[in-house]
C-alpha cells in the first residue's frame, strides 16, 4: 500500500494519494503515543483503504509498519533484495518503528486501558454512556470524552481529559485531609475507643449485677410459691414483672457490648479516604481516580463540559465546609468585622 504497479514500465510507482498517509502512519507510530489498534480507525477516517479497496485492519497496520518494502527493500523467497522502487520512509524512521513495536510488546486487545474514565460517566442530556477518543491539537495528542449518541442526536459537548482531571482534582482538594491531621484524628479515635470500652465495661458489670439480683429474686419467689406462701395468681403476677426486668437488662447488656462503638469503624474509613484524596491530587496514575469517585458518590455525569456527581452526604458536607472557608479567606474585612478566627 502506498505504491502502484505501472503496467507500462512494469515498475512500481509511488501512489501520490496514499503514500503521504502511509508515511504519516509511521511518523505517528514512532511517537509511542498511540496503540496499534488506534490506527485502524485512523485509516478509516482518512479514507485510506487497501489497494483492493478494503478497510484496513489492525493486522494490516502491523504488517505495514514492519514491511521493509517502505525503505526500498524487497523480500523474495525469504531473502532480502535491494528494490528498484523509491523508498517512502527513511531507514532511521523504520528502525525506530521496530523499536517502539518491540517495546510496546503485544497488541493490547482492550483499548479501555488507555482511557481512565471510560465507564464512569453518563451523558446529562440523553443518558447514554460517555465514550473516549484521541484527537490531535495544540501540537499534541489528547484524549477527550463525549456522548456516544446511541439514542440519536445529542447536543452535549465533549470534555478534554485534562480539563476533566482538573475538575476532579478541584473537588478532591475540597475533601482532602493532610497526613498529619489524619494521624491526629485516628489517634483521637483510638483514645475514644479505649475510653468507651472502659466505660462500657463498667456499665456492663453494673447491668450484670442487676441481672443476677433479678435472678435471685426469681429463685426466692419460686421457693416461696413451693412453700405455699403464695397463691398461683400472686406468684404469676410477681414473676411477670421480674421476667420483664430480666429481658430489658439482657437487651441493654447486648447493646453495650456490641453497638456502642459501631460508629468508629466507618468514621476511621471516612477519615482515611479524605487522606487518600490528598494523595490522589498528586498522583499521575489516573486509573485510581474513577475508583475513588465511585466509592464516594454516585450519578456521575457529563453536563455542559462539566463533570458532575452526587457525593455521599459526608463528603458533600466536607466539601461545602471547605468552600465556605475558602470564601471567608477571600473576604478578610468581613472576617475582621465578625471577629471570626481563621
Ligand atoms: Zn447525550
Image (spheres, grey):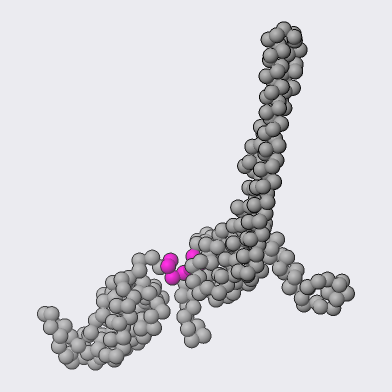
Judging depth in this view, the residue of 109 and 47 nearest the camera is: 109
Percent from the top left, x then y, of residue 294? Answer: 55, 59
Quarter of the view holding residue 259: top right
User: In this rendering, would 271 be left or right of 102?
Assistant: right
Query: Is residue 114 within the magenta segment?
Result: yes
User: In this rendering, would 277 be left or right of 58?
Assistant: right
**In this view, 207 is above or below 137:** above
Please report the bounds of the magenta region as a residue range.
112-118
Residue at image point 15% right, 88% down: 81
Quarter of the image that includes the C terminus: bottom right
Percent from the top left, x then y, of residue 43? Answer: 37, 76
Quarter of the view holding residue 317: bottom right
Residue at image point 68% right, 15% down: 222
Query: Is residue 238 within the magenta segment?
Result: no
Percent from the top left, x then y, of residue 15? Answer: 29, 87
Percent from the top left, x then y, of residue 51? Answer: 27, 78
Asked if residue 19 shows in the view, the reply is no
Judging depth in this view, the residue of 195 and 4 nearest the camera is: 195
Amino acid at each position: 500500500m502506498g505504491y502502484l504497479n505501472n503496467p507500462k514500465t512494469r515498475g512500481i510507482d509511488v501512489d501520490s494519494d496514499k503514500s503521504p498517509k502511509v508515511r504519516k502512519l509511521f511518523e505517528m507510530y514512532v511517537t509511542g503515543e498511540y496503540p496499534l489498534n488506534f490506527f485502524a480507525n485512523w485509516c478509516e477516517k482518512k479514507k485510506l483503504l487497501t489497494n483492493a479497496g478494503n478497510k484496513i485492519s489492525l493486522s494490516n497496520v502491523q504488517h505495514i509498519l514492519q514491511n521493509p518494502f517502505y525503505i526500498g527493500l524487497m523480500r523474495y523467497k525469504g531473502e532480502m533484495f535491494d528494490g528498484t522502487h523509491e523508498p517512502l520512509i527513511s531507514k532511521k524512521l523504520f528502525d525506530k518503528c521496530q523499536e517502539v513495536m518491540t517495546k510496546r510488546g503485544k497488541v493490547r486487545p482492550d483499548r479501555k486501558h488507555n482511557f481512565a474514565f471510560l465507564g464512569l460517566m453518563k451523558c446529562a442530556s440523553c443518558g447514554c454512556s460517555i465514550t473516549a477518543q484521541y484527537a490531535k491539537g495544540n501540537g499534541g495528542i489528547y484524549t477527550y470524552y463525549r456522548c456516544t449518541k446511541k439514542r440519536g442526536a445529542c447536543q452535549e459537548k465533549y470534555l478534554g481529559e485534562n480539563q476533566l482531571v482538573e475538575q476532579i482534582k478541584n473537588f478532591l482538594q475540597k475533601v482532602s485531609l493532610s497526613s498529619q491531621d489524619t494521624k491526629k484524628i485516628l489517634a483521637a479515635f483510638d483514645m475514644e475507643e479505649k475510653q468507651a470500652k472502659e466505660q462500657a465495661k463498667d456499665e456492663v458489670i453494673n447491668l450484670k449485677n442487676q441481672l443476677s439480683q433479678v435472678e435471685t429474686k426469681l429463685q426466692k419467689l419460686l421457693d416461696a410459691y413451693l412453700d405455699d406462701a403464695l397463691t398461683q395468681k400472686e406468684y404469676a403476677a410477681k414473676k411477670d414483672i421480674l421476667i420483664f426486668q430480666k429481658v430489658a437488662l439482657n437487651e441493654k447488656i447486648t447493646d453495650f457490648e456490641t453497638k456502642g462503638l459501631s460508629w468508629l469503624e466507618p468514621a476511621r474509613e471516612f477519615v482515611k479516604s479524605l487522606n487518600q484524596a490528598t494523595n490522589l491530587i498528586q498522583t499521575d496514575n489516573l486509573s485510581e481516580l474513577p475508583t475513588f469517585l465511585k466509592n464516594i458518590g454516585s450519578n456521575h455525569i457529563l453536563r455542559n463540559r462539566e463533570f458532575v456527581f452526587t457525593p455521599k452526604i459526608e463528603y458533600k458536607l466536607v466539601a461545602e465546609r471547605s468552600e465556605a472557608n475558602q470564601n471567608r479567606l477571600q473576604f478578610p474585612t468581613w472576617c475582621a468585622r465578625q471577629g471570626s478566627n481563621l
